Each structure stands twice: as structure tokens, then as C-alpha cells.
Image (cartoon, helix red, strand yellow):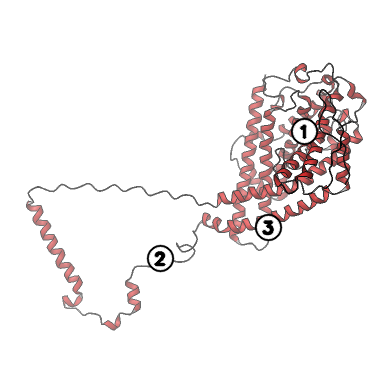
Amino acid sequence: MQHHEVDTDRRPGSGRPDTGRRGTAGLRGAGGSGSDPDGAAGYGGDPGSAPGSGPRAPGGAGRAPSGGGLTSGVRGGGPAPEDERVPAGDRLTAGEVLAGYLHARAGDFLRGVRLYDESGADSAAAESAARSLRGSARRIGGALHTFRPLLDPGWADQLVTELGWLTGTLAQEQACANRLHRLMGALARLSVPAPVPAPAPVPAPAAVPVPAGGGRTGRERGERAERGGRTERQTAAGPSARGGFSAPAAASGPSDTSSTSAPSRPSGPSGPSGPPSGPSGTLTVGASRAGALLERRLTLARTRAHSAALQALGSSRFHAVADSVAVLASEVPLAPVASAPAAELLPGPAAYAERRLLDAVSALPLTRAAHPYNAEALVSGLATTADGETQDAPWHHVRQLLRLHRYAQEVWCPAGTADPVLTVAGQALDRHRDAAEAAAAAANAARTPRIAPATAYALGVLHADQRHEVEAARYAFQRVWQEAAAVNKP
């Protein structure tokens, strides 16, 4: 395996990294097992829809729109002034600002490759390195996609495609592990029987006062006690004491003994000796089998994803990507237009990404999502697979566009961080995607031939639970979006 000569340390006051030898040979493992805060696969950009390939992105001195949602920040009115967003806007060109961001992200990528190579058997270090590798690859791809008019188009499109392939391949293994963990946790939560409330205490009867002298009440109690004693003696003597016939001893067999004994407890599935009846009992019976079926299916998928990641990391295609990123850490192929001031040129592509996000959000059914437990996601999940994917697809598309807009803000903001409201909204959409994929996995497992009815019932309950999680994520997203829109409304 070849070495990529790059040092991710920077000289003080310089926008370019030093060059030195960083070994990336001997990659082992596949993408790590850590959860990625930015989601699973890709960075949500379609090269064909990048600014400059379809409708021309506004260049000039355009600014990002200030209203219509949470994309203008929560500062209470429009974008920040130029001297706040670009501290040295009069001295830095758009190419210098973009190149500085790409240099930093390329250094993070190469550092992640090196740390993953050095992790060895340390799973925690491999997880952290893989998370850094995927996150930096997505940010590089997002910046190249958004600010494509400032770069060499052919080079940018090719690198965007290769980085999307790499992040998607490395994220599959962790996605399968997270899906299995989510489904098993939901099964354990749903199969726990509800606690039975304790019976209410019965109040003691009130005491009846007894006359002090005894009198007539005492004599009546004595007569009643004497009559009760005679009745008990006659009952014990049987019919012979009253002149009747007593049953012979031989006539009383085992059947008579059983008929006079106390009734036995019912046996079978509905009795105490069997599992509890009803829906909760059926779920308890089928939960273990459903969990075993899901574990077999998702473990097999994770093993295949791990093998695919190992093959990708050892391929010549990955070496070509690493070489391109190593070159990007020291030199960015800019277009001639990138020599314009950053305050004049950078807002154009960022505003184009924001408008795409606003248009996609306006097409979402936010009014219906504002009502919790509206059952829209559940009804769509009970339809065919194609209908369910069609209903979830607009939300997944908004998640991708939101990530692109957040990465564009990281380039354009002076602090290098996006609006925190965008982060919260992105986390809600990440939960939406995870729940939708988990529900699809439960539905696919329920289609397994020749499974027990209790197993199919448990998988159906699990599917409905995850579709309710989809509704909860949509509700959380629309609340964040509407609150931010209300704050920024002039």
C-alpha cells in the first residue's frame, strides 16, 4: 500500500499544512462500530443538482434569504453582517476561504486513516477513527458539491462521487449494528408486562354496641347457639341419625372422592401453569423468537457489510481517493472566478443550498405532523413497501439538504460552526431515518415464510412501535422548524 505524504499540522499563521510522511499502509477493519452523529451514508448531495450544473447558482453579491425557517439562525433577524461572517473579507478571497476549510477537512481525513491504521485490536480507537474518517469525507464532499462554481468542475464531480461511495460503504456495518440494537431494545421494552395494581384495602365493619346488662339480647344469643349445636350434631350423624339409609362403604370409590373435593385449577395456556393469555402474553411468547430472527438477519447483513468495507479499504479505488485527498490537503484546484472577494462570492452558492432546503421543507406535511400521534406514518407503513418508501422519501431528502446547508454554513461562518438549531433539526431527522429503517427491517422479517403466528404478531407490534417513533421524530422536527421561523419572522 502506498504512502500519502501529508502532515496535518499547520504552521502558525499559514493556511496550508506542512508536508511530511504519514503512513496509511496496512488498513485493517471496516469503518469502525461507532455511531455517527451526522448519520449513516453519504452527505446528501446529487452531483447532477449541484449549483452550476442545473440552474446557475447566483454569483455576485447575493445574500442568503433571511426568512422562512430556521436557516437564518436564531439571532432574531437576517444574516450576520459581512465583518462578522468573514472577519477579513476585504483581504481574503473566496478561494482562500474555501481552500482553508478544505485543507482542514482533508487533514482530518488523513488523520483518521492514520489513526485507524494504528488502532489495531483497539475497538474504541478504531471506532473513533472511523467516525472521524466518515465525517471529514462527508464535509469535503458537501463543500465540493455546494461551492462547485468556485472549483474545477470535472475534478470536483469525480471526487464527490468517490467520497460518497466510500462513506456509504463504511457506514453500512454500523448502520446494521445500530438497527439491531434499536429493535432489540424496543422488543425488550414492549414485552415487559404491565404492573398489576394492588387491590384496594377493604374497610373493617363497624362494631355493634352490646347492652351492658345482657337482658333479652344475651338470652337470644344463648338460644341461637344451642340450636346451632343441635344442627351440627345431626349433620355429622348423617341420614341414619334421622332414620334414613347410609351409603355402603363399597359404593364410595375414587370418583366420589374426586367429586366431593375442591375443584382443581384449570390447566393449559390460559391457566396459571401456562403463559398468560391475551395480547401481552402472545407478545411475550413471540418476542424471544422475533428477537432471534432479527438477530440472525441483521448479523448476517452486518457481516456482509464488514466484508464489503474490508474489500473497499484494500482496493485501488480507495487508494486513489486517499491520494486525491492528500493532494487536496496542500492544493485546491480553484476556478478563476474564486479570486473575487469572499464577501461577494461565497453567499451565492450558500443561498442556493438554502433555497433548495426551504423548497423541500415547504413540500412536507408539517401541518399534519404538528398533531402528535396522527397515525399518518403508521398507515403508510401498513401499505405496500413502495408506498411507505414514497411517503418517507421527502423527509429523507430534507435531511440530506439540511446537512448540505449546515456544511455550507461551516465554510461561511467565521467560527466554523453551523447554527445550533440546524443541528437539533438534523438530529430529529436522523431519528426519523433510523426509525423508518428499523420499521422496514421488522416488516421484512415478518415476511419470512413459515414463521409462528406469535412471532409474526411480535414483529407486527414492533413495526407499529417504530412507525410511531417516525411520527414522534416528525413532530419534533416541525416544532423546531416552526419555533425558529417564529423567532426569525420580522
Question: What is the CA distance from the residue labelled 2 to the residue labelled 1?
Answer: 66 Å
Position of 324 relative to 80 (above/below) = below
* Residue at image point 66% right, 36% down: 428
Which part of the image, by quadrant, shows the C terminus? top right
Q: Residues within 10 Å of mark 2 (few under 14, many from 20)?
A: few
- Classify 9 as above or below 28: above
Q: Along the polypeptide, which appears first: circle 3 or circle 2?
A: 2
Kind of residue at badge 1: Leu
At a point 62% along the width and 36% down the height, the residue shown is 475
> Horizontal placement of 367 versus 149: left or right?
left
Residue 401 picture location, percent across and down: 76, 34
| Residue 296: numbered disc | 3
Element on which disc 3 rests: helix
Residue type at mark 2 is Arg
Q: Mark 2 highlights which residue? A: 265
Give neighbour class at mark 1: few <14, some 14-19, many 20+ (Cα, 10 Å): many
Foreground mark, 2 or 1, reads 1
Quickly name the residue at label 1.
Answer: 404
Q: Which of marks 2 and 1 is nearer the N terminus?
A: 2
Q: Distance between the residues labelled 3 and 2?
A: 40 Å
Question: Total number of numbered labels?
Answer: 3
Between 135 and 319, which is closer to the camera in this rendering? Answer: 319
